[in-house]
Amino acid sequence: MTSFLVSGCQTRCFSDFDCGDLSFCTPSGRCETECFTDKDCTNPPECEGNPAACECKGLRCNPYGACIGQCYSDFTKIQSTSPDDEIPTEIEGWDRPPGEGRAFILKTLAIAGETSGFNLDGRCKGTGECIDNSLWQLGELGNASIRQGLLNGETLLLIELVGIDEDFRGNDRNLTLKIYAARDADQPIRSSNNFSIPEGASSCCEFKLSEQSVRGNPRQAIARAPARIELGDLRTLGTVYLRIAISIGSPPYPELDLRRLLISSRVASDFSQMSDGLLGAALPARTLAQTNNPYCQTLSTFCPQTLPDSSLLDLVVALLQPDLDMDGDGLEVVLPGANGRIAECYDGCGLNCSEFGPSIPPYDANEPYTCALQPEIQDGFSVTFSFDAVQAYVVGIGR
């Protein structure tokens, strides 16, 4: 697969990790800095000269210098029907150091079925058809390997709830949810005690947070969102960005960028577990174009021909097209060719168009599939993961 990655700011990038401190990778593939403080997001500097045209960019400034979380108006449009859902001005636990809250390690993770998920774009296909989870079909391919990665301790994801009321009895209208990639803290590593205490042992479930999940000085969770618990039902009140390694194929596993991420779950009153969890997000098409496809090494229902050098985007666009308009110009179109690889790409053509938008040339003229690596490809596919989690303990950061 072709790569045009160059490290450093103001250069091409595929993810935030390709950029320096206080900079992030934009959907167009450039390292930029959007903010230094939360005020830069809620009241951008350009508002001072033209307050009538002021637009909120997000709720908080993350350690990458990117505005995250939906503004009040955006959140109300996409998910809220009640003014009670407004995000508090001061979010409990937002700036608390990693490891100070109630921690949970995911013990199950799977691509959820077609009817599970969130409305990630504020639109509905028809009456009652508002759930976005277009990649549910890939559960048949990926769920077995995802489960094995969890059991082997190769893919570990930890959720932390911070700022919870001391007298918690199932309700807390103001807290912070943080998400981290985690590492088994045992030396030597022992995956048998990741989710429960084995027979003859006295403890379990101790983890270190991955260095890639924190940033800044002092270090803070990259992925954090305001949240609320009502009658034991947890839900985030804003979207976040998360980059995680998923056990697809053989190690080293690909890291996937999940954007517009929302989480819901049941939380036990004694914080012993989270159940019936859902994690919904947008998976950018360009991320899939950079991820090797392990499923078409042989013929199968999903792969009528072998594609040893293909990407996951080659596999996906044989089934469906992007369903989330990430840049507001209408949905891009990515078409497969007769050889099973991507052959053509078209930019968005507006919200109510009947034709394809402008053709996007390939990055490498000799490789048509590289059109999907161009910065014009900004849209993505909706996906929802189901999960359950058990109480865990954070004992540090790093290996």
Image: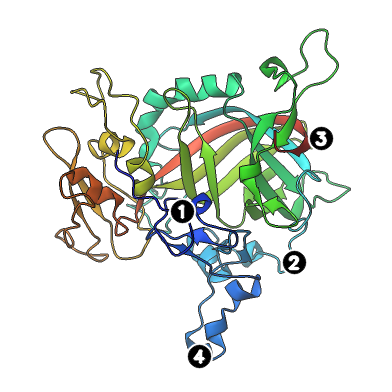
- Observer able to see residue 230: yes
The amino acid type, in three-letter code, at marker 1 is Ser
Query: Quick one: label 2, few (<14), some, or many (20+) residues within 10 Å?
Result: few
- Residue 242: x and y in percent read 55, 47
Say whether disc 2 or disc 4 marks the residue closer to the N-terminus: 4
Helix, strand or loop status at disc 4: loop
Structural distance between the alpha carbons of marks 3 and 4:
50 Å
Q: Which residue is mark 1?
A: 7
Q: Is residue 69 found left or right of 175 in the rendered image?
A: left
Helix, strand or loop status at disc 3: loop
Q: Which residue is mark 2?
A: 90
Structural distance between the alpha carbons of marks 4 and 1:
35 Å
Q: Which residue is mark 3?
A: 270
Q: Which residue is mark 4?
A: 50
Structural distance between the alpha carbons of marks 2 and 4:
27 Å
Mark 3 vs mark 2, foreground winner is 2
Query: Quick one: label 1, few (<14), some, or many (20+) residues within 10 Å?
Result: some
- Residue 373: x and y in percent read 30, 50
Say whether disc 1 or disc 3 marks the residue closer to the N-terminus: 1
